[in-house]
Image (tube, rainbow, N blue to C red):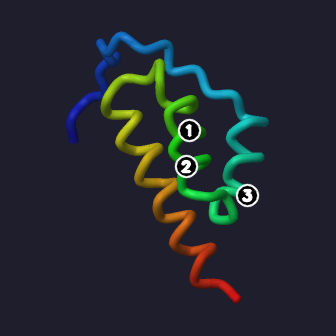
Amino acid sequence: MRDSNIATNSGPGNVDAKKLRGLAKEWGKLPEKERAKAMQELIRDMPPRHRELIENYFKKLAQNQASQP
């Protein structure tokens, strides 16, 4: 097993938990334009790797919510 290393990316890595919970709850109900705007706000100061993870999370969240009755 490899040891963990401290990340050297430039973003602060701060996430507003309250904002994230609110967006997650309503994500699938938002129009595409509003989802894109919210995504940009969430990831603007994050390192590229974190951006990719957050984007994938919300894409899956939207798919799951769209498939629920």
The local crowd at label 2, few if under 14, some if 14 to 19, many if 20 or more residues have their Cα within 10 Å, is few
Precedes in sequence: disc 2 or disc 3: 3
Q: Residue 37 carries which label?
A: 1
Which residue is label 3 attached to? 26
Point 56% across, 32% down: residue? 42
Comparing labels 1 and 3, the label whose residue is closer to the camera: 1
Most distant residue in the bottom direction: 69
Q: In this view, does 57 lie to the left or right of 28?
A: left
Say above or below: 41 vs 31. Answer: above
Which residue is label 2 attached to? 33
- Quarter in which the C terminus is drawn: bottom right
Residue 56: give x, y in percent of width and height: 41, 53
Amino acid type at circle 1 is Lys
Do labels 2 and 1 touch, CB within 8 Å?
yes
Point 36% across, 23% down: residue? 47
Q: In this view, does 61 lie to the left or right of 11?
A: right
